[in-house]
Image (cartoon, rainbow, N blue to C red):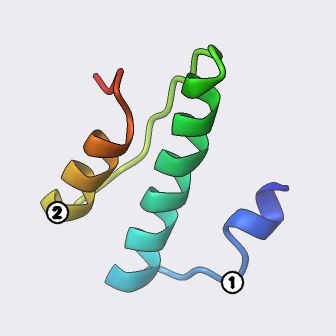
């Protein structure tokens, strides 16, 4: 599954944003199903960081 989520992503701003959004989406799915998800992802862009924060109710 991991190869499908990050398939062919590079280091451009667009690709980094996609990667962080995918990580946020998976962690929100886990959290909604009462699974603790600890994620360490570098989000150098504030807008995507805030977007993922809104996606996850228990974002710390």
* Mark 2, secondary structure of its residue: helix
Residue bearing mark 1 = 8
Residue sitting nearer the eye, 6 or 25 = 25
Q: Mark 2 or 1, which is nearer the eye?
A: 2
Q: CA distance from mark 2 to mark 1?
A: 23 Å
Residue located 79% across and 68% down the image? 4
Residue located 33% across and 48% down the image? 52
Q: Residue furthest front?
A: 32
Quadrant position of residue 37: top right
* Mark 1, secondary structure of its residue: loop
Residue bearing mark 2 = 47
**Lateral position of residue 27 relative to residue 2, left or right:** left
Callout 2 environment at 10 Å: few (<14), some (14 to 19), or many (20+)? Answer: few
Residue 30 shows up from this direction: yes
Contact? badges 2 and 1 (CB < 8 Å): no
* Quadrant location of the N terminus in the rendered image: bottom right
Disc nearer the start of the sequence (2/1): 1
From this view, report whether residue 3 is shown above or below residue 26.
below
């Amino acid at each position: 599954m991991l190869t499908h989520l990050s398939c062919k992503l590079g280091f451009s701003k667009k690709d980094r944003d996609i990667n962080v959004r995918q990580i946020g989406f998976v962690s929100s799915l886990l959290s909604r199903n009462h699974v603790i998800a600890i994620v360490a992802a570098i989000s150098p862009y504030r807008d995507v960081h805030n977007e993922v924060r809104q996606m996850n109710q228990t974002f710390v």
